[in-house]
């Protein structure tokens, strides 16, 4: 019987993998490697550990790589049919589960769980089943499998049926909805999600708050955790990587360009986000406008450097949100701008080096999400900031649990309160700002990505 098992001892499953492919004009395939906590975690266990990353082919280039049998050692990419993936990823994961956990629905009109939802849910099941079957095929006897996030909540239960010998973990990178909001899902679907998760031996969450919300849902809907262990692992910033990367030549070039856009001697309020609906960029801009209205002494003395990088632009609601961010920024510049001062410097084209340059220049970091699993920007800016920064932080960010004591904490819906916090942050003397930043940085780097992954693996293996 043992001969039917695979060879991998440690497996990670996620929608997006560590590598992506593009087809060049000459027909050749170009591979691009990604970074992040899972990449550094898997590399930290060593190349002799028989580790495998199972992920989905996301682009035409990825699918072509699978068809040609092109791949990287340690990665198995699944060629799920494009229409099935679109239903599962956009239709269910990002338009239903993400909305539930971030409490984003405009409930007079949405959600509507109709026949189309059921059709897409069937695709979500098929997508999760493809992962479960691949993991079952590749895992050695007794191997450890850590499944990632809301895209794959059914995998633990499906995999448990296929391979009861495995040690199965799941990690949630999002918040978890409170019981009353979670119950918006159809009863059978809510139960299926929870039982899918409870197929794992161990479930990981970013904060105690999200873990407790999950436990409450289980108590209310399926009679408890049924022996599944719960762990909290607050993913931290990768200080060594960030400090090194933020002093490379391309970042210095971006700093020079940004300094020109900002102007001499001005203070900076920095935000760097994807234009996800949960990030609350529009209210952040409105709070800045309120600051300039209520505190005219800051006019021409401060610039809001706002990077809002497009996200999920294949969904209309995200395209509309990105357009609204741009509209409000233009409105502020039209209302307050002078020939020598642009109040909002907005960039919408993704540029990591420019983000790091902004981190280094930040006097104030504005992180005001409606709701966020963690928010690594809140942790990264204090690590990189040259002169030290004050963090204005939403109490609804997961990072609040670790950084709240050293931040100026805001209610993300309270624009006037956020404007007042920005004024307070800008008024903090340089010495105190540097001290706050040091304490924030220490808290932010307490659990670096490799350690975060290895801790989960050790706990799962018991």
Image (cartoon, rainbow, N blue to C red):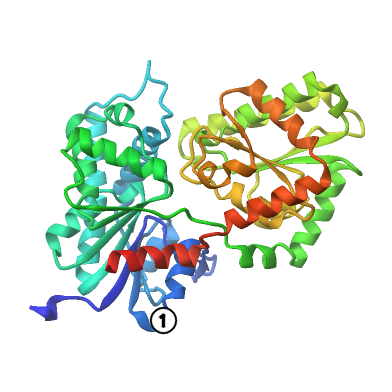
Query: Which residue is label 1 attached to?
Result: 47
- Choose between 327 and 165: the one closer to the eye: 165
Tell me where residue 188 appears, x and y as whole percent: 17, 34
Inspect this view and state whether residue 406 appears.
yes
- Choose between 77 and 216: the one closer to the eye: 216
- Figure quadrant of residue 406: top right
Residue located at (17% from left, 75% from top): 5
269 up-or-down from 255: above or below: above
- Choose between 188 and 386: the one closer to the eye: 386
Inspect this view and state whether residue 22 appears.
no
- Figure quadrant of residue 111: top left
Tell me where residue 411 appears, x and y as whole percent: 57, 28
63 up-or-down from 409: above or below: below
Tell me where residue 443 appears, x and y as whole percent: 58, 54
User: Badge 1: few (under 14), some or many (20 or more) residues near its Cα, within 10 Å?
Assistant: few
Residue located at (13% from left, 62% from top): 162
Quadrant of the frame with the N terminus: bottom left
* Secondary-structure class at tag 1: helix
Quadrant of the frame with the C terminus: bottom left
Residue located at (28% from left, 27% from top): 184
């Amino acid at each position: 019987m043992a001969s039917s098992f695979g060879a991998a001892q440690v497996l990670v499953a996620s929608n997006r993998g560590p590598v992506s492919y593009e087809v060049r004009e000459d027909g050749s395939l170009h591979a691009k490697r990604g970074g992040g906590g899972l990449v550094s975690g898997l590399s930290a266990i060593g190349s002799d550990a028989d580790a495998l990353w199972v992920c989905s082919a996301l682009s035409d280039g990825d699918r072509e790589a699978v068809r040609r049998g092109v791949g990287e050692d340690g990665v198995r990419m699944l060629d799920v049919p494009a229409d099935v993936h679109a239903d599962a990823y956009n239709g269910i994961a990002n338009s239903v589960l993400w909305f539930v956990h971030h409490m984003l629905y405009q409930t007079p009109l949405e959600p509507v769980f109709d026949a189309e939802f059921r059709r897409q849910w069937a695709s979500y099941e098929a997508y999760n089943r493809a992962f479960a079957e691949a993991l079952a095929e590749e895992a050695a006897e007794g191997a450890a499998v850590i499944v990632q996030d809301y895209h794959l909540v059914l995998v633990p239960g499906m995999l448990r049926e296929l391979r009861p010998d495995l040690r199965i973990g799941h990690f949630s990178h999002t918040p978890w909805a409170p019981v009353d909001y979670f119950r918006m899902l159809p009863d059978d679907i809510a139960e299926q999600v929870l039982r899918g998760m409870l197929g794992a031996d161990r479930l990981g969450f970013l904060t105690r708050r999200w873990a407790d919300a999950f436990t409450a849902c289980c108590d209310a809907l399926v009679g408890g955790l049924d022996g599944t262990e719960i762990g909290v692992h607050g993913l931290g910033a990768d200080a060594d990587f960030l400090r090194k990367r933020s002093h490379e030549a391309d970042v210095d070039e971006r700093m020079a360009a940004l300094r020109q856009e900002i102007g001499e001697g001005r203070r900076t309020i920095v935000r760097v986000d994807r234009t996800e609906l949960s990030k609350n960029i529009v209210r952040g801009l409105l709070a800045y406008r309120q600051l300039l209205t209520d505190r005219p002494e800051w006019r021409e003395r401060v610039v809001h450097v706002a990077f809002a990088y497009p996200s999920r632009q294949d969904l209309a609601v995200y395209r509309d949100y990105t357009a609204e961010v741009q509209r409000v920024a233009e409105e502020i510049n039209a209302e307050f701008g002078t020939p020598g001062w642009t109040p909002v410097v907005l960039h919408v084209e993704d540029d990591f080096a420019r983000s790091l340059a902004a981190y280094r220049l930040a006097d104030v970091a504005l992180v005001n999400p409606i709701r966020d699993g963690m928010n690594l920007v809140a942790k990264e800016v204090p690590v990189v900031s040259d002169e030290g920064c004050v963090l204005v932080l939403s109490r609804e960010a997961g990072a609040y649990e670790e950084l709240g004591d050293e931040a100026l904490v805001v209610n993300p819906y309270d624009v006037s309160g956020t404007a007042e916090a920005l004024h307070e942050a800008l008024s903090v003397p340089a010495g105190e700002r540097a001290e706050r930043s040091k304490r924030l940085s220490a808290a932010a780097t307490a659990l670096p990505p490799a350690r975060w992954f290895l801790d989960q693996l050790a706990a799962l293996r018991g």
